[in-house]
Image: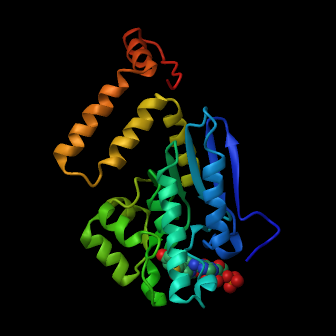
Amino acid sequence: MSTSEPVVFWEDRDAIGLLTLHRPKALNALNAEVMAGVAELLRTRTSRPDLRAVVITGSGGKAFAAGADIAAMQEFTPAQAEAFARLGQDLAMAVQACPVPVIAAVDGFALGGGCELAMCCDILIAGEKAKFGQPEVNLGVIPGFGGTQRLVRRVGMAAAMDLCLTGRIIGAQEAVAIGLASRAVEGSALDAALETAATIAAKGPVAVRLARRALYENADADLLTGLAAERSLFALCFATADQKEGMAAFLERRDPVYTGR
Ligand code: CAA
């Protein structure tokens, strides 16, 4: 469905980029246009050197995203379904490949593809009205945007099976308890996500980038391989101006001024 209004938009707020999914009448359901729009914004708006974090949110107050667009999928052939799943999976990879951390601000529903988009972000903040689930079995399908794979890695087999087989919807507290959400907050997730982004923006940019890399690149490695990679990246920090500034500032009892070099 193409509308005259943009279905995604971007706002620069100092060091933070705010990306909003904007199909409020359809609870920000993810169709091809939305997914292409998010991918395009991540590609074109994240290269400015002073950007430090991205926050993804949904407009309308009721949903982050209530899933992949059911109306768009209804008549899919298997080949079209596979291409659509590829689009969603590629989008999740694009989020992880973003040069700066990405924070999901979940207020309201994050279901199906919406839950999958939220869980591929680096940090997932759940507001008090957040609702999560993989309800695809209600529709006779399974998660297709990485849900079965990322969910099991994130929350373990027991909770992932429970969510994917029953389609049950859980709130913010349970999402934190099982490790799906990073944090539950009272009130709005968006406010907390923007605060978290500002916190990250004040840290050494190189260290933030390398920490993220150490976590992602070795998440599926064996322990010894992961530790070796961590040592190399730790060593790399000591070739940066940010390390010198961060440690000097601590010892001189002042705030660091990072240059990201
Ligand atoms: N796709 C398309 N439209 C959707 C949608 C979706 N995933 N979710 C909600 N909408 C639309 C509704 O059709 C409705 O549109 P109309 O006003 O034109 O009828 C509008 O958004 C508001 O929705 P409701 O009236 O249903 O709102 P509610 O408050 O009564 O219920 C809800 C909210 C529980 C989230 C309910 O909308 C719902 O169950 N949505 C579907 C959730 C779902 O099954 N998501 C998984 C999709 S499959 C998937 O994502 C596969 C994958 O992994 C790739």
Depicted 44 relative to depicted 249: above or below: below
User: Could you tell whether 237 is left or right of 128 in the image?
Assistant: left
Q: Residue furthest top?
A: 252
Q: Residue at x 50, y 87 (%)?
A: 78
Depicted 238 relative to depicted 24: above or below: above
Q: Position of residue 217 (x, y in %)?
A: 34, 48
User: Could you tell whether 110 is left or right of 166 in the image?
Assistant: right
Task: Say how many tags the image has.
Answer: 0
Q: Position of residue 98 (x, y in %)?
A: 52, 48
Give the quarter of the image for residue 140. bottom left
Q: Nearer the viewer, residue 212 or 103?
A: 212
Is residue 126 in sight in this rendering? no
Ligand 1, seen in the image, is in the quarter at bottom right
Q: Residue furthest right?
A: 4
Q: Quadrant of the N terminus?
A: bottom right
Q: Position of residue 213 (x, y in %)?
A: 38, 42
Q: Nearer the viewer, residue 160 or 169?
A: 160
Q: Residue at x 60, y 51 (%)?
A: 42
Q: Residue at x 67, y 69 (%)?
A: 33
Give the quarter of the image for residue 154. bottom left
Is residue 201 in sight in this rendering? yes
Q: Residue at x 40, y 53 (%)?
A: 182
Q: Nearer the viewer, residue 261 or 157?
A: 261
